[in-house]
Amino acid sequence: MKLSRIIIYFLSISVFLSTEVKSQRYLSTSRTITLYKVLDVSLTNTSAVFDFSALTNYDNGIYKAGMITATVKANVPWKLTLTVSNNTLSPQITPTPMPASVIGIKASSAGTYTNVQNNTPFYVQNNRGLYTVPFDLRALPGFQYETQEYVGDFYFTIAEQ
């Protein structure tokens, strides 16, 4: 009888210990992630030249799909604006410039071209994320300008909306 009491006593201790071992304790700690404003744009060009060697180009203009592609990385809503220096394309020989408005630009997904000029700048905007935005360009100088090369710098500026 004493042996059976001792066995029961040990069994009850082991049951008690097994319930104690199963209880758990949780601890927590905090970590901080600090994010900063990201507004990044990079440009790639497929071509930088409009070559008016054919007469029909003067009549119809030259259209270049995807001539410039902007890659935008932003964690805030953004606006990408195009401006040009002095609203002109600089001549390489004579002093008479060509207005930059002979060049039109549009996002490839848009329907109409916007003439390049600073007083009504062209822009594209969107929400935060990663975007690839191809731009189509059109050159339509007509017959009004002297024979030579004209060069212009296009400035793309990204800003928070």
Image (cartoon, rainbow, N blue to C red):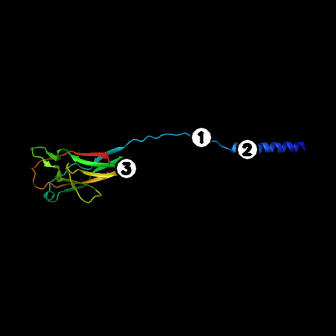
Label 2 or label 1, whichever comes before in sequence order: 2
- Mark 3 lies on residue: 130
Question: Which of pointers 3 and 2 indicates the residue nearer the eye?
Answer: 2
- Mark 1 lies on residue: 27
Q: Label 3 crowding class (10 Å Cα cut-off): few <14, some 14-19, many 20+? A: some
- Amino acid bearing label 2: Ser
In percent of width and height, residue 3 lies at: 88, 43
In the image, 65 versus 95, the foreground residue is 95
Badge 3 vs badge 2, beta-carbon distance below 8 Å: no
Q: Is residue 84 left or right of residue 72?
A: left
Which label is found at residue 61?
A: none
In percent of width and height, residue 19 lies at: 72, 45
- Amino acid bearing label 3: Leu
In percent of width and height, residue 75 lies at: 38, 46
Instruction: Name the residue: 22% across, 47% down.
Output: 83
In percent of width and height, residue 25 lies at: 64, 41
The kind of secondary structure element at disc 3 is: strand
- Amino acid bearing label 1: Leu
Is the residue 119 above or below the residue 109 in the image?
Answer: above
Q: Residue furthest right?
A: 1
In the image, 100 versus 119, the foreground residue is 119
Q: CA distance from mark 3 to mark 2?
A: 54 Å
The kind of secondary structure element at disc 1 is: loop
- Mark 2 lies on residue: 18
Q: CA distance from mark 3 to mark 1?
A: 38 Å
Label 3 or label 1, whichever comes before in sequence order: 1
Q: Is residue 45 left or right of residue 148?
A: right
Q: CA distance from mark 2 to mark 1?
A: 22 Å
The kind of secondary structure element at disc 2 is: helix
Task: Examine the image and state in which quarter residue 21 appears.
Answer: top right
Label 3 or label 2, whichever comes before in sequence order: 2
